[in-house]
Image (cartoon, coloured by chain):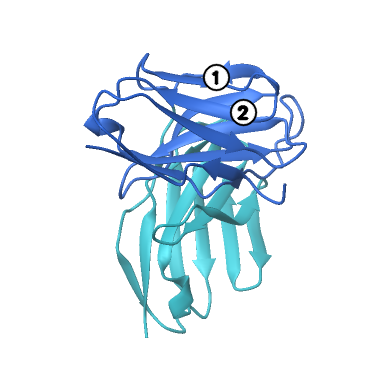
Chain colours: A blue, B cyan
Amino acid sequence: GAGVSQSPRYKVAKRGQDVALRCDPISGHVSLFWYQQALGQGPEFLTYFQNEAQLDKSGLPSDRFFAERPEGSVSTLKIQRTQQEDSAVYLCASSSRVTGTPKEYTIYFGEGSWLTVV
Amino acid sequence: QKEVEQNSGPLSVPEGAIASLNCTYSDRVSQSFFWYRQYSGKSPELIMSIYSNGDKEDGRFTAQLNKASQYVSLLIRDSQPSDSATYLCAVNEDDKIIFGKGTRLHILP
């Protein structure tokens, strides 16, 4: 596609509910990133995929957070038993860069999924 | 995780003046440095990337990098009201990009 597409754009979840956020990266981009951005803060790294391999998940805040990219394209970020502190914008970004290649590259962000837990 | 530090602002600059935004980072081996602009309610968009020491100019924007001092800055010349936004400094840590908390810039008409 022309850009990174995320859905849903807005989600209101009741505390304890499970949610799934979808990211469709730019066609051909091998690298995919998830970030969490709370109000007034910068994006916080969550996890990173190269194709279907999850190479870094050090930023996932708890075991309630799970991400997958089974076919190396679309990715889903799942949050189980949502809590109020999970309320944030979840940003997906993609890049054409492959690990081990020169570090001159750009990551492109989607519009984000705004999650509110009530 | 290494850190990227920015003054949160707000930084108020008169229209037409130069806005100067600063950022320091802690990872000495970082090689890629980025400035993103984020309007309220929107996602970050890349303004500049810089990989070598010195200055890089693109239109009204100049990025400056000093790896010895672990310092990167963004200058915006002839500031316009449309430049009012949050500016995010970002640095690579291995293969991931780490962001600062951002500096809010307000251009005064």
For the residues bearing labels 1 and 2, Cβ distance under 8 angstroms: yes
Same subunit under labels 1 and 2?
no
Is residue B68 visible to us here? no
| Closer to us: A49 or A27 | A27
Q: Is B38 placed left or right of A49 in the picture?
A: left
Q: Position of residue B68 (x, y in %)?
A: 54, 41
- Disc 2 marks which residue? B95
Spatial CA span between label 1 and label 2: 9 Å
Residue located 58% across and 40% down the image: A93
Find residue A4 and report its image quarter: top right
Q: Amino acid at mark 2?
A: Asp
Residue located 64% across and 50% down the image: B50
Q: Position of residue B72 (x, y in %)?
A: 51, 51
Pointer 1 indicates a residue of which chain?
A: A
Q: Is A111 placed left or right of B10 in the picture?
A: right
Q: Amino acid at mark 1?
A: Asp
Point out the frontmost of discs 1 and 2: 1
Q: Is A110 placed left or right of B22 in the picture?
A: right
Q: Position of residue A55 (x, y in %)?
A: 60, 18
Q: Residues within 10 Å of mark 1 (few under 14, many from 20)?
A: some
Pointer 2 indicates a residue of which chain?
A: B
Seen in the picture, residue B25 relative to B84 is either above or below; the reply is above
In terms of secondary structure, where does tag 2 sit? Answer: loop
- Disc 1 marks which residue? A56
